[in-house]
Image (cartoon, rainbow, N blue to C red):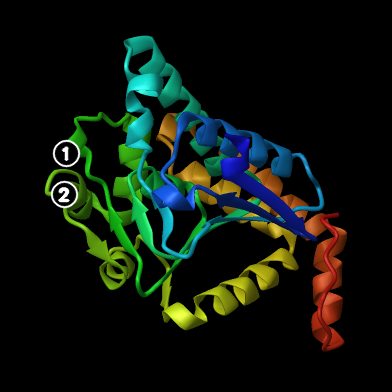
Amino acid sequence: MEDQILTRKDGAIGRIIFNNPAKMNAISLGMWEGMGKAMKAFEADDEVRVVVFSGAGGKAFVAGADVSKYAEERGAADAQEHYARTGEDALQAIYTSKKVTVAAIDGYCIGGGVSVALVCDLRYCSAKSSFGQPAMNIGIGYRYSSLRRMVDIIGYGAAKDMLLGGLRFTAQEAYIKGLVGRVLPDDEFDQWTEKTVTEISVGAPLTAEDIKYTLWTYAQDEAKRDTDRCEELFQICYASADYKEGIAAFAEKRKPVFTGN
């Protein structure tokens, strides 16, 4: 199913596209596998600074899991565990990445789509988008890591509304609850997102790594926080050639050219 996960590299921008439009980009086991492989490939590519997730077809980011494959992929206990582990591995590859990750949500973002969005650093959506987690309608379970990420981002009450109450959030409601950082008119979404992603891609990669790791550390249990590494990344920024370039570019009123050194 790797053809249902498309990848493209445009300079410093890596793109991972959910490509199952006939089923509103519903995710299967093969798509989770393809997503994890694609993310790891971009992680190993020093030229890539930003990874953008989007859905093909213009109607959905991801509209949940592909229920037509439940019996085949999740029918037995061991198969379900393999499916869950594969999905979690893909999510962790995104969540722990050094790259800036962006969820460009244009349309339905349901179930696994919300899970993918929550592990991305930045989440933007079009006005037509909607968000939901119909767990109670299917009988699925959630691991601690997934629910913690949700509560950290949208709050305890909103998480219960979505999961237990089955509430579907509009784009504006998702913005109010912190699930997305910006809502764009449908006809402006692609252009605005592309402009924003391009600006991020030419930013200082060492600064991005410092910010990402420090915020990620803050979100961990206190016993697991490596604050020494946070301090190390902080010092690396100020000792870097990129810092000197940034200061020089500011003084010379030009755009900086960062190399990650």
Alpha carbons under labels 1 and 2: distance apart: 8 Å
- Which residue occupies the foreground of this view, 257 or 183? 183
How far from the left and from the top, in percent, is residue 59? 42, 63
How far from the left and from the top, in percent, is residue 154? 30, 55
Residue 47 visible in the displayed image: yes
- Which residue occupies the foreground of this view, 160 or 110? 110
Q: Earlier in the sequence, mark 1 or mark 2?
A: 1
**Residue that mark 1 sits on:** 137
Q: Residue at x 23, y 49 (%)?
A: 159
**Dot 2 amino acid type:** Gly
Q: Residue furthest bottom?
A: 253
Q: Secondary structure at mark 1?
A: helix
Q: Which mark is residue 164?
A: none
**Dot 1 amino acid type:** Asn
Q: Residue at x 69, y 48 (%)?
A: 233
Does residue 200 appear to the left or right of 160 in the view shown?
Answer: right
Residue 118 visible in the displayed image: no
Does residue 33 appear to the left or right of 127 in the view shown?
Answer: right
**Which picture quadrant has residue 240?**
bottom right
Q: Which mark is residue 166?
A: 2
* Label 2 Cα neighbours within 10 Å, binned few <14 / some 14-19 / many ≥20: some
Does residue 241 appear to the left or right of 90 in the view shown?
Answer: right
